Image (cartoon, rainbow, N blue to C red):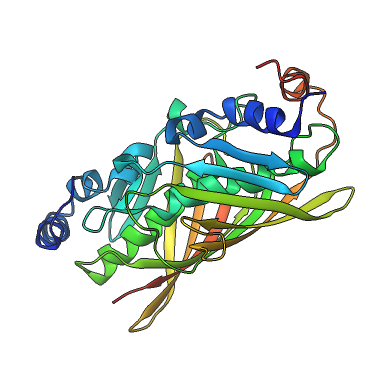
Amino acid sequence: MRLEAADIEKLVRQAHDSGDYAPLVAAIPYARLIGVKVEPMGEEVLFRLPISKDNIGNPVLPAIHGGVIAGFMEQAALLHLMIFMKSPNFPKIIDFSIDYLRAGLNKDTYATCQVWRQGRRVGNVAITAWQTRSNEPIATARAHFKLD
Amino acid sequence: MASIEDRARSFISVLRHCQVLGITVEQADEKGLVLRLPYSESIVGNPVTGVVHGGAITTLMDTCCGISTVCFLPEFEICPTLDLRIDYMRPADPNKAIFGFAECYRITPAIIFTRGVAYQSSKQEPIAHVVGTFMRMGKPDKQGQLSRTMDGGAA
C-alpha cells in the first residue's frame, strides 16, 4: 500500500504535536516488520526493539540477526532526525557503518541517537544499542543522511 | 563433504530472519556467494516511494558477507561480524529483487576481510558497496550440531 506524501506529512505533524509516534512507525512497513517502538523520555527519545523470534539469526545462542540490529539502529537514527528536525520528509541514507561489540541475545534491545552534525543537506548521527545496561553497548553505529 | 552451494543453502536455512525475508542462495562457488532478496511490501522503508529499507539490504549483505566464508574456508566455522559498512550508490528500484554478492579477499588465522555489492539489474551498476570484517572462532565444539549440519548438508 502506497501513501501520498501529504498523508505522511499529516502523520508526522500529528506525531510531533501529540508526542505519540506509534501511528507514524506503523506506516513504515519495515519498522512494523521488526517491531520498532518509540518511547519518549522527557525531552529525549528511546527506541526499543522488543524480543521476537522472527528477528533471530544464529539459532544456537540464540541471537538477534546482526542485520536486524543494524536495521533497528538505522530506523532509530532516521526517526530521531525526523523527530528533532520536525521534518515531514524521510531522510535518505547515504552510508551506514556498524561495530558489533557483544552478541545481541534474545532480549529487548534499546537504542539512543546523537546528532553530531546537522547541516542543510547532510546529517551525521551516532547510534548506540544495548540490552542489559546502557554502558555495555551491543553495537555502536554511525550514519549519514541526505536531508532535503 | 557437501558442495559449497549445499553448505551455503544449509547455512541460510537455519537463519530464521532470513527465512522471514525470503533470502535464497542464487550461486555459490570458490569465487564467492550471490544471495537474492525478493521485493515485498513488508520490507519497504519509505511508504511514499516504495523503496526498500536500508535495514533489509544490511541484513542481505551481512548474511552474504558472513556466509561467503563457506566459499573460502575448508570447513564450517562460526564467524561473528566485527563490523560492516555500507555505502549507498543509488536507491533500489521498487518491485524488483535485490541481489547481494560477497567474497573474502583476505583470510588470516584470526580475521576474515570480506567485500561485496548489492545490485538489481547488473552487478556493474551497484546500489550499494559493502565491506565487512569477521572474526574466526575456529572449529566449533559447542556448536557441533550446527557444524555437522553445515558440512554434511543434512538440514
Q: Residue furthest right?
A: B109
Which residue lies at the image location 81% right of the left edge and 51% below the top edge?
B111
Q: Position of residue B84 (x, y in %)?
A: 62, 56
Answer left or right for A128 relative to B72: left
Observer able to see residue A84: yes
What residue is at 81 percent from the left and 38 percent from the top?
B137
Q: Residue at x 83, y 23 (%)?
A: B1
Tell me the quadrant of the picture where the C terminus of chain B can be found.
top right
Judged left or right of residue A83, residue A71 is right
Residue A148 percent coordinates (x, y): 28, 77
- The image shows residue A107 at horizontal and vertical percentages of 49, 32
Can residue A135 be seen here? Answer: no
Above or below for A86 versus A33: below
Percent position (x, y) of residue B45? 32, 52
Q: For this view, does A129 lie left or right of residue B10?
A: left
Q: Quadrant of residue B54?
A: bottom left
Q: Is residue A8 above or below residue B150?
A: below
Relative depth, front residue between B85 and B124 = B124
